[in-house]
Image: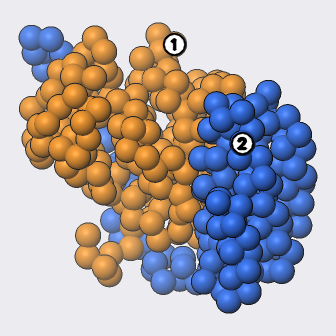
C-alpha cells in the first residue's frame, strides 16, 4: 500500500481489488436483471406475507410493555418491515412502519400517551397485509388512514 | 457509465450483514441476478466479523440497526480493530436509517457508500458499479480511519454544507486533500 505521511494523518492508496475482480463488459443486461428480480420478489412477497403474522404478533405483545422494553421490540419489527416492504411490492407497509418507529422511540419518554396511536398503526399494518393493499394511494386504505388521523388527534 | 455497459460482477465475494432473514433472501436474489453467487449472510455483526477473519470478502454490505453489535461499531471494528483482517475492505451500508445524522455517523465510522432501503436490484447494481469505478484513498488519523470523506459518497454530495451538527460548513470537494481528523 502506498502511504503518504502528512502532519496529523496518513493517506493510504490501497490497490483496488474490485478493479481486479470486475470485468467492465459481458455481464447480464440490467433489463434482464430487473425482470428476473421482479419475478423473484413476487415469490418472496408471498413468503413475507405468510410470516408477517409473527411480526405483527410480536408488535402487539410489545404494546403490553411499552416503556419497559416493549417499545424496543416494536421498533425492531417496524424498522425491519420499513426496509423490506417496499422492495417486496408493499410500500404501504413501509409508509406505516416508518412513523411507527418514530412513535415507539418516543414511547418511554411520553409515558405511554401514544399507546392508542401505536395500536391503530399496528392494526393498519395488519389490515393492509390481510387485504393485500399495496399502496397508500389505494382507495381501500382511505378509511384506515382516517382512523390514524383521528388517533393522532 | 454508459447505459449499455454491462459489468460482469461474478468474481465478487460479498458478505451481507442484516438481522432480517427476509432481507438476506432479497439480497441473495438480487446478487444472483447479477451472477454473484459467492455470497455469505449473517444476522449478527460479531459473527460477521469472524467470517471476515476467516475469508475477507470483496465487499461487505451491512445494515446499521442491529443487535447486539450495531453497524456503526461493526464498521469501526473493521476499520480500526487491531485484529482486523483488512481495514480497506469496501463497506456498503444498506439501511433503513435515512436521517442525516445516521448518514454522517456511518461515514464517520468509515463506510464507503450508503444506500437507503427499500432497495431495488437496479439501485444496488448501480451502487456496486459506482464502488468499482470510484475507489477512494484512505485516511488514517487519530480519530478516523476510512475512505477520504472529502470525496463525497454518491447521492450525498454537499453533506457537510447541509448539516449544522457536522461542525463544518466546508463543502466536500472532489479532491485527494485529506481533512485530517474533523470528526
Residue A123 position (above or below residue A115): below
Residue B6 location, x and y as percent?
38, 73
Callout 1: residue from which chain? B
Indicate the colouring scheme: by chain
- Which residue corresponds to mark 2? A113
Instruction: Decide if residue A145 is in sight here.
Output: yes
Q: Position of residue A91 (x, y in %)?
A: 62, 71
Whole-percent x, y for residue A97 in the image: 66, 57
Side (left or right) of B16 relative to A54: left
Residue denoted by label 1 = B83
Q: Residues within 10 Å of mark 2 (few under 14, many from 20)?
A: few
Left or right, A153 with reference to A57:
left
Placement of the N terminus of chain A among the 4 image quadrants: top left
In the image, B138 versus A121, the foreground residue is A121
Residue at the spot x=48%, y=83% of the render?
Answer: A31
Dot 1: what SS? loop
1 and 2 marks in contact (CB < 8 Å): no
Describe the element under mark 2 as helix, strand or loop: loop
Outermost residue on the front side: it is: A153
Colour chain B appears in: orange
Q: CA distance from mark 1 to mark 2?
A: 47 Å
Amino acid at each position: 500500500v502506498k502511504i503518504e505521511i502528512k502532519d496529523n494523518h496518513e493517506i493510504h492508496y490501497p490497490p483496488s481489488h474490485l478493479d481486479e475482480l470486475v470485468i467492465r463488459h459481458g455481464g447480464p443486461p440490467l433489463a434482464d436483471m430487473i425482470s428476473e428480480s421482479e419475478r423473484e420478489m413476487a415469490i418472496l412477497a408471498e413468503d413475507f406475507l405468510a410470516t408477517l403474522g409473527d411480526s405483527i404478533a410480536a408488535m402487539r405483545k410489545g404494546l403490553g410493555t411499552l416503556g419497559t422494553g416493549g417499545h424496543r421490540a416494536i421498533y425492531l419489527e417496524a424498522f425491519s418491515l420499513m426496509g423490506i416492504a417496499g422492495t417486496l411490492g408493499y410500500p404501504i407497509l413501509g409508509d406505516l412502519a416508518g412513523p411507527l418507529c418514530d412513535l415507539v422511540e418516543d414511547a418511554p419518554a411520553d409515558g405511554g400517551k401514544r399507546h392508542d396511536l401505536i395500536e391503530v398503526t399496528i392494526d393498519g399494518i395488519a389490515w393492509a397485509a390481510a387485504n393485500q393493499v399495496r399502496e397508500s394511494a389505494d382507495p381501500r386504505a382511505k378509511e384506515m388512514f382516517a382512523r390514524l388521523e383521528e388517533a393522532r388527534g | 457509465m454508459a447505459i449499455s455497459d454491462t459489468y460482469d460482477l461474478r468474481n465478487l465475494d460479498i458478505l451481507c450483514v442484516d438481522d432480517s432473514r427476509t432481507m438476506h433472501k432479497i439480497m441473495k436474489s438480487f446478487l444472483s441476478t447479477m451472477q454473484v453467487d459467492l455470497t455469505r449472510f449473517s444476522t449478527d455483526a460479531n459473527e460477521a466479523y469472524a467470517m471476515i477473519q476467516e475469508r475477507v470478502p470483496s465487499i461487505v454490505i451491512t445494515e446499521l440497526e442491529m443487535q447486539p453489535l450495531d453497524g456503526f461499531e461493526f464498521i469501526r471494528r473493521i476499520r480500526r480493530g487491531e485484529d482486523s483482517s483488512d481495514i480497506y475492505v469496501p463497506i456498503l451500508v444498506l439501511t433503513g436509517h435515512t436521517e442525516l445524522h445516521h448518514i454522517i455517523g456511518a461515514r464517520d465510522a468509515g463506510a464507503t457508500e450508503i444506500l437507503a432501503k427499500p432497495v431495488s436490484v437496479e439501485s444496488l447494481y448501480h451502487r456496486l458499479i459506482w464502488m468499482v469505478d470510484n475507489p477512494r484513498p484512505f485516511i488514517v488519523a487519530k480519530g478516523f480511519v476510512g475512505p477520504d470523506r472529502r470525496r463525497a459518497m454518491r447521492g450525498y454530495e454537499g453533506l457537510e454544507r447541509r448539516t449544522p451538527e457536522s461542525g463544518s460548513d466546508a463543502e466536500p470537494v472532489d479532491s485527494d486533500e485529506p481533512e485530517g481528523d474533523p470528526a
